[in-house]
Amino acid sequence: MQYMIGIDLGGTNIVCGLVSERYEMVDKVKRPTEAALGVDHVLDKMADMIDELFAKTGLDRSHLLAVGAGIPGFIDPERGVSIFASNLKWHDVDVAGRLSVKVGVPVFIDNDVRMYVYGEAMSGAGRGAGVVHGVTIGTGLAAATVVNGELYYGSGFMAGELGHVAIDGETTPCGCGLTGCLESVVSATGIVRQAKQALEAGRDSILRESYERGELSAAHVSQAYDEGDALAVDILTYTGQVLGKGLAYSISLLSPDVIVIGGGGALAGERLFSSVRDTLQRSVYHGYLERLTIRQGELIDDGGVIGSAAFAKNRAEKLRHAAAGGAM
């Protein structure tokens, strides 16, 4: 059996997993990123984590097919270059080339959200579907689309920035320079912002205690929803409605079989999804909805690792077939 390494690189931690060719997680390790110590430090740490996984599992390293890595920010997956990753302070870093030299096998990289969605499409909530549109709700909101096992990139590898679709009636400034972006509402930070603004305007809520302690989080809003708190219900209902408006564009343009909603914000589940569905019923032609399923992500923290490994397998096999064809 062949194996792949999948890496989920974040500004705080690196998660490195050993994944089978059936996309099963064999084992994984997690280490702090320490990006401030430089690119080579991070790449050396990745290489050391790969060594650690093979030492832990006792598997034969000669069966390692390739390494895949999901990296935040703007990525050129064809060249294997991190064009810009703000939380890592990386600019034009040849991650694939430099890491490949260290580990001795081909390395392939892509954006971390695309790798999460690819994992869900190949081995999670979207497996078996032809067109999978995935959305991650975390600090921000991003999306990606997989069509028959292949990622859709658009021009300049920029497809999927659903979080920066401007929503009518929203006036919150966004870090991208626009106003009223979808992710200013549909994100963990957007949910907390809505709660803080309502509390500061005098709304009564059991969330006030968490707010005054400086501990208010999106999870607190979900918990308050379950306790029947009117403000929490309003916030999650509105957040779902806004997400539904954004997804209406995606559905009409892409006609997906499955929409997978992942990330920490998706843990709100039906508290959020019910108003998403209600909004879509009012906003999208029924012919699209009849063949569409909306699912919560299944892979949780492993999605980026499994997706990166699956992506590496896909790319390595393509290179192998191309080389075999050229040799004939």
Image (cartoon, rainbow, N blue to C red):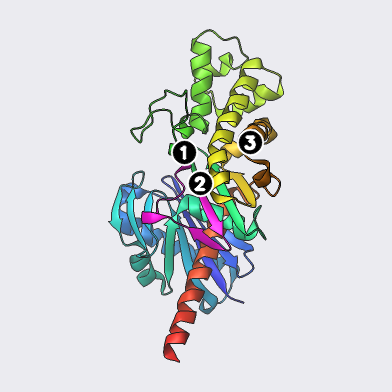
Give the percent coordinates (x, y) of residue 94: 31, 62
Residue lying farthest to the top in this orientation: 202
Magenta residues span 144-163
> Residue 164, how many percent across, how many down?
43, 37
> SS class of the residue under badge 2?
strand
Q: Amino acid at mark 2?
A: Ala
Q: Which residue is disc 3 drawn over?
A: 280
- Dot in front, 3 or 1: 3
Asked whether the beta carbons under mark 1 and mark 2 sit within 8 Å of each other, the answer is yes
Quarter of image, res 231: top right
The quarter of the displayed image where residue 266 is located: top right
Q: Is residue 182 magenta?
A: no
| Residue visible at 42% across and 24% down in the picture | 172
| Lower sequence index among marks 3 and 2 | 2
Q: Which residue is mark 2?
A: 143
Q: Earlier in the sequence, mark 1 or mark 2?
A: 2
Q: Earlier in the sequence, mark 3 or mark 1?
A: 1
Q: Position of residue 41 (x, y in %)?
A: 34, 57
Q: Quadrant of the N terminus?
A: bottom right
Tell whether label 1 touches label 3 (CB within 8 Å).
no
* Type of amino acid under label 1: Gly
Which residue type carries mark 3? Leu
**What's the mark number on residue 163?**
1
Label 3: how many Cα within 10 Å (few below 14, some 14–19, many 20+): many
